[in-house]
Image: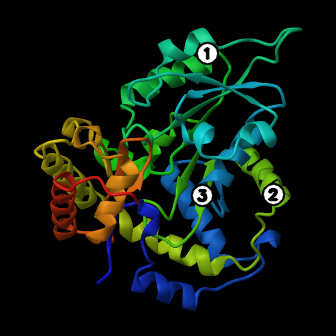
Amino acid sequence: MNPVDLRSDTVTRPTPEMRRAMYEAQVGDDVFGEDPSVNALEERGAAIAGKEAAVFVPSGTMGNQIAIAVHTSPGQEIICEEHSHVVLYEMGMLARLSGCVARTVATTDGRLDWESVRPRVRGSSDHFRGTGLVEVENTHNYAGGRAYSMESLAQLRAGTRAAGLAVHMDGARVFHAAAALGVPVREIAATADSLTFCLSKGLGAPVGSVLTGSRAFINEARLARKALGGGMRQAGVLAAAGLVALERSPANIPAVHADAKFLARELAAIPGIAIDPAAVETNIVFYDVAGTGLSAKQFVGSLRESGVLALALGPTRIRMVTHQDVNRADCEKAAAAIKSACASPAIAY
C-alpha cells in the first residue's frame, strides 16, 4: 500500500491526461524560440498573470533568482520577510548570483506591509548601494500557507511605486492564494512587477515554473536563464504537462484547502498537539509536538511506521501539505496516525 504522502505538494504524479499530452507534444528548440508547446505555455501563463510575457524555467528557485538578477544591481539590498523562501531555501543565491544583500523583516505571519517596509528603504550613498527590490511570497510557505490580502498588496504596491522600487512576487502557490481570496491570479499579479508561479506544487505537473513580467523584463530573463543553464531545448514534453495543469488543476484547489482545514481541526482535538486551525488558510498545515514529549524527528518516524509521511521543520515543528493526490480518507488516516503517535513512547529514529 502506498503511504499517505503529506511532505509537500511537490510529490504529486502527472495525471493520465498530462502523460498523454507529454507523449503527443509538438516540440522544437526552445532556445531558438521554436518549441510550440513551450510557446503556448508561456503565452497562457502570461495571460493568466495579466503580464506581457513569460518564460518557462525548470524551477521556482531559478525563476526567483532570475527575477532578482534582472531587477537589481550587485550590492543592492532586497527587502523581504525573514523566513521567505529566497532567504531560507535558495542556497544563498541572491548573494552568490546577484551580489545582493537580504534586508529582512520579522513578521508573525509571513506577510509584509508597507509600514514595515518603508523604514527599511534606503537610497544609495557612498556607504551603501541602497534598496533594489521588494520581494513578497504569496502564499508564504514557512508561515503555513498564509495569503496576502488584496488591501495589503495594494498598499505595498502604492508605497513601492512612490519610492521607485520594483516588486517581485514569489507566487509558487499563487493559485492557492487566488482560491483563498476568491480573485483571479491576474489581480494578485497586478500588484507586482514580476511573478513566478510553480506548475508542480499546487498544480500537479511533474516539473517547471513560469516567470512573468513585462516584455523587456522577460527578454532579459531569457538571457539570465541561458546563463544559468536553463535553456532546455525540446522542453515541450514538459510544457505540455504544464498546460494541462494550468487548465485542469485550479478546480481541485478548493477541495485541497478543505482537506487541510479538516486535518487542522482534527489535530487541534488531540492532546499534545499545538495548532491554530484558524491560521490554516490554504493547503499547508504546521503543528508543534513539544507537548507530546517527542521531537519532530521522532514523531515523523512514528508516522512513517503508520504509512504517513510528514516533514520535520524544526526541533518540534512538523509540516503537512495537502494536494490533489490525497483525499479526505487519506487525511483521516493521517489524523489517526498522529493520535496514535501521541500515545506512543519516545522512539529513537
3D distance between C-alphas at marks 2 and 1:
33 Å
Q: Amino acid at mark 2?
A: Leu
Relative to 333, 63 lies left or right: right
Q: Which residue is identified by label 3?
A: 210
Of residues 289 and 252, the one nearer the viewer is 289
Task: Report crowding for label 1: few under 14, some 14 to 19, many 20 or more residues within 10 A (C-alpha).
Answer: few
Q: In the rendered structure, are the residues bearing label 1 and label 3 in contact, judged by CB atoms less than 8 Å apart? A: no
Q: Secondary structure at mark 1?
A: helix
Disc with the residue nearer the chain's start (3 vs 2): 3
Q: Quadrant of residue 203?
A: bottom left
Relative to 112, 347 lies left or right: left
Of residues 58 and 42, the one nearer the viewer is 58
Task: Name, please, the residue furthest toward the left.
Answer: 269
Residue 3, horizontal then vertical, whole percent: 32, 74
Q: Amino acid at mark 3?
A: Val
Residue placed at 66% from the left, 23% from the top? 165
* Disc ID at residue 228: 2
Q: Which residue is identified by label 1?
A: 162
Q: Secondary structure at mark 2?
A: loop
3D distance between C-alphas at marks 1 and 3:
28 Å
Residue 256, horizontal then vertical, whole percent: 27, 59
